[in-house]
Amino acid sequence: MKLELGNFFVKDITFGDNTSFNNGTLTINKEEALSVVREDEDITEADLVIVKPGDKVRLVPVKEAIEPRCRVAGGSVFPAVTGELIQAGNGRTHALKDCSVLVVGKHWGGFQDGLIDMSGEGAKYTYYSQLKNIVLVADTNEDFEKKEQQKKNRALRWAGMRLAEYIGNCVRNLTPEEVETFELEPVSKRCEEINKLPSVVLVLQPQSQMEEMGYNDLLYGWDCNHMVPTFMHPNEVLDGAMISGSFMPCSSKWSTYDFQNFPTIKNLYKEHGKTVNFLGVIMSNLNVALQQKERSAQFVAQMAKSLGADGAIVAEEGYGNPDADFIACIVALEDAGVKTVGLTNECTGRDGASQPLVSLDEKANAIVSCGNVSELIELPPMETVIGELQSLARDGLSGGWAGDEKLGPSVKEDGSIIMENNSMFCGDQVVGWSTKTMKEF
Amino acid sequence: MKKAILYLNQFFGQIGGEDKADFAPVINEGQIGPAMELNKNLENAEVTHTIICGDNFMGSNEEEALKTILEFLENKEFDIFFAGPAFQAGRYGNACGVICKAVKEKFNVPVVSSMHVENPGVEMFKKDVYIFKGGSSAAKMRKDVKVMAQFGDKLLSGKKLLPADEEGYFPRGIRHQVWLESEKPASERVVEMLIKKLNGEKFETELPIPKSDRVAVAPPINDLSKANIALVNTGGIVPVDNPDRIQSASATRWGKYDISKMEILQAGQFKTIHAGFDPAAADADPNVILPLDVMRAYEKEGKIAKVHEYFYSTVGTGTTQAEAARMGQEISEHLREANVDGVIMVST
C-alpha cells in the first residue's frame, strides 16, 4: 500500500469568485460553498467565516475539524461516509495544509463540543489556534437533540466533511509543493535489515462507548462499537478511513483532522527502518461492559503477538471509564511479552490531588501523559465570538457550568470565562501534538 | 518584613539530649539554634519566635502538645511556619509533620520542613507539608536550612512555583499540567520511550504508578474451635460519645473498646462516625458492621473458642495508605499481645 499525500501550503484564505488555490492563497466562492453545505435540508442556517492565528476571536461550540482534501483519481475523501466505500490509503490524495474546516454551532452546544481562542492566553490550549480556519457556523432542525447534553451533530459534521471535500477539490489538478510518501512493505516480506529491528505496532482506542448509533467514531462508516480489534495499514487512518465521533469530553476527543494527520503514526513512519520496524495499526475500541473491555484487550494482545510485535504504543481517546480499557490493553500486551508504552491524558481534579487514571496497574510502567482534563482555566473577554458564548455555560459542555457555589457561572457578564480544560477543542492532543505533560507538585 | 516561626526539638532547641526528651513545649521570642541560621538566610521574613518541644513529649502526649503549641500561636502574627530540619531522626520527623499539618489547618499559612528520605515522617506527611529532601545528619544543617529559607522566600514573594522535583521537595501527590520547555511533542516522547524500553535502557514514565503494597494471605487457622477471634473494622463503629475522637474521614486515630461483657452491640450505645456512607442502618444496628451478635452465637456453638475482649475501630474513607499502615501495625501489636489467633476485618 502506497499513499502519496500532495501538500499545498495555505498562507492566506479569502472569499472570491472562484474557489481556487493560487500561490499560497486559497480563494473560496462563499455562495457555492454554502450551497454544498445546504445540500442537506436539515441545515437551516449557515455562514462561512475565515479566522487566522492572532485574530481576536473566540469560537464556541466547536464540533469538528477537518482538513480539506481530494482524492486525485476520484472517489470520496471519507469512504462509506461521504461517498462509496473504497479502499483508503492507496494512491494520491491532495491536501490543503495549515488550514482546517471548523464546524461551529450557531447556537447550541453539547458535552462533546469545545472552545478555541485564536489569540491570547487561551490560544495555547488547542492546536487549531495555529491554523487558518474556514469556519462553518450553522444551525439545524435536529430539534430532538437541541436541548440534549449529548448531541450526534450529524447534519453539521457531515456538512463539514462535504465542505472540506468541496474546498479540497480545487487542488485536484494542480502540482503539489511537496509530496509525502507513505509506504510499508507487507509484514512478512520485509528485508533482513528491517526485520532485525524491534517490531512495533500502534494500538488505537477510538471512542465507541455509546450503545446508540450516531455518536461513536466511524471506521469506513462502521460504528466502532460494533467491532472487535482489527489490523489496519496506517495509511488508511491518514487517508480518511476514520471519522471523529461526537461523544467524548472535548479535550480528550480526536477530531477527523487529528486522524488525517496523526503525528504518532507519522513519527513511527519516520523511525521505520532506522530504529523500529513499524508493523502497522491495531484498531481497537473503547467499551462499556467489563467483558467487552477484556475481549478487546485479548484480541489486541493476540494480534500483536501473532504479528511478531516486540513493542506497542497504546493510545486512548478518552478518560475516566475508558482508562479501564487502556490499562487492560497495556496489561494484556505486557503479559504477552510485548513491551508497551501508553499515551493518554489524566484527570487529577481541579486541585490535582485525584488519582490520575481510574484504573492503575504496575505493569503500565511507561506512560506519556498529555494533560489534566480538569485543570481550571480563566480567560479574559474576546472581541469577537463566533457561535454563542452562552453555550459554554448553558448547554452542558464538559468543561462549563451554569453556576458554581464558589466560581459562579462559566460565562461572566463581561464575556470573560472560567472553564475546565475538558472543553478545550481537542486540547490534550493525545494523537501526538501535545507539548504538555503532567508534573508533581 | 513578614514573620516566620520555627519549631525545634529539645536537642536543637538547646535544652538537652535524650534525657530531656520529655520536655514540655515552650515558645521563645527570638531565635535559638537553627533559628538564627534560618533568619540569616531568609530575605523576605524575620524569625520572630522559636518553639521547642521534646520528641517524646510530642510522641506520647501529642494532643496536649498540639493544644499548647496552637495556643502559643493563637495571638502571634506570622506568615509562614517552619519545622526542623529533622534529618533522619524518626520521632523528630513525626513531630515536625504533626505540628506543621496542624498549623496549616488552623492558621492557613504555608508550612515547610526538611527530612532525609528515610525519615518515616516523609511518607506520613509529604502530602500535607512541603518537606525538602534533606541530609541524614546535623552535618547538613546549614545546607538544609538554606534550602528551606530559599523556598520560604519564594512562597512569600508569590513567585510561580516549579514542580516538586525542580524545587526539591518530596512530591505531594498533586499533579498539574505544564508545557515542556523543550516543546517536544508527545508523538516523539512516546516513540523515544518505546525505543528505550525495547532496548532495555532507562526511561522515565510521565505517570509513575504507585507500587501496590500487597500483603500475603495468612495461612488458615487449623482448629477454629480453639481460636481467639478479634473484630476490627474501618466502618467507624465507636461508643456514641466517640471517646478517642476518631475523625469521620482521613482518619489518623483508632480506638479499642471493651466488649467482654456484651452479647450484642446496642444501638444508642454504639454508632458509626464514618462520613462515607449513609449511617442510618449501622446506627440502628451496629452489629451490621461489627457482627458481635453472630460471633457470640458461634462462641456458644463452640465453632470458635472465644471472641477477643476488645474490638478495634477506625475510619477508612479518605485515609491515606501510610496512615492506614501505621494504624494497622499499632493495632496488630495489641492483638499479638493478647494472643489473638484470627481477625475478622470489616471494611465498608
Image (spheres, rainbow, N blue to C red):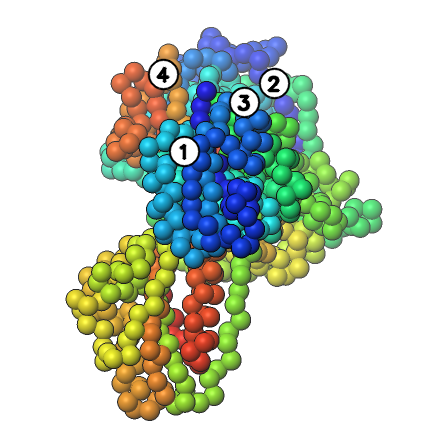
| Residue kind at label 4, given as amino acid type | Pro
Location of residue A16 in the rendering, given as x and y in whole percent from the top left corner: 47, 8
Between the residue at mark 1 and the residue at mark 3, the CA separation in whole angstroms equals 18 Å
Going 33% across and 32% down the picture, which residue do you hit?
B75
Residue A249 location in percent, x, y? 40, 38
Image disc number at residue B43: 3
* Camera-side residue of B131 and A126: B131
Q: Let me know if residue A223 appears in the view.
A: no
Question: For the residue labelled by badge 2, is the local secondary structure a helix, a strand or a loop?
Answer: strand
Under tag 1, what secondary structure?
A: loop
Tell me whether marks 3 and 4 sit on the same chain.
Answer: no
Q: Nearer the viewer, mark 3 or mark 4?
A: 3
Residue type of the residue flagged with mark 1? Val
Is disc 1 surrounded by few (<14), some (14 to 19) or many (20+) residues within 10 Å?
some
Find the distance from the CA under tag 1 to the CA under tag 2: 55 Å
Chain of the residue where label 2 is placed in the rendered structure: A
The image's mark for residue A381 is 4
Earlier in the chain: of badge 2 and badge 4, it is 2
Query: Circle 1 is placed at which residue position?
Result: B109
Residue under disc 2 on the same chain as residue under disc 4: yes
State the image quarter where residue B188 is shown.
top right
